[in-house]
Amino acid sequence: MTFSEYEMYITSINEIESRIVDDTKFPIVRDNKIKRCCEASLELTKLVINYLKYNIRDATKESKTKNKDE
């Protein structure tokens, strides 16, 4: 995956989160516990995506640096 793909995923997750929290967009879900669980799981997903995004970028930089040194 590329850096921009990760950004698209994070943007989509942010949009979903705002829909869950805003009662005018999703009045069907009335239970706040469900909303909090969804919000927490989406935040966890964003953390994993950010972790992958930055580790891949750092690993790519390291491999390019190693190839130049050889």
Image (cartoon, rainbow, N blue to C red):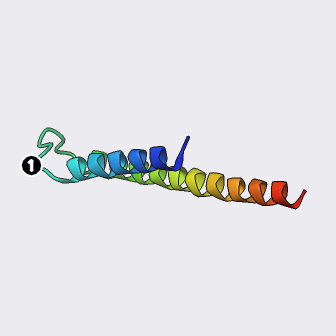
The residue under the point 59% across, 58% down is 54
Q: Is residue 32 left or right of residue 57?
A: left
> Is 34 in front, or is 69?
69
Percent position (x, y) of residue 11? 35, 50
Residue furthest toward the left? 24
Q: Is residue 8 left or right of residue 59?
A: left
The answer to whether residue 35 of the structure is visible from this angle is no
The quadrant in which residue 26 appears is top left
Q: What residue does disc 1 label? A: 24
The residue under the point 9% across, 49% down is 24
Label 1 neighbourhood size at 10 Å, few (<14), some (14-19), many (20+)? few
Percent position (x, y) of residue 25? 12, 45
Percent position (x, y) of residue 30? 16, 44
Mark 1 residue type: Thr
Instruction: Check the picture and name the quadrant holding the N terminus.
Output: top right
Percent position (x, y) of residue 3? 52, 50
The answer to whether residue 58 of the structure is visible from this angle is yes
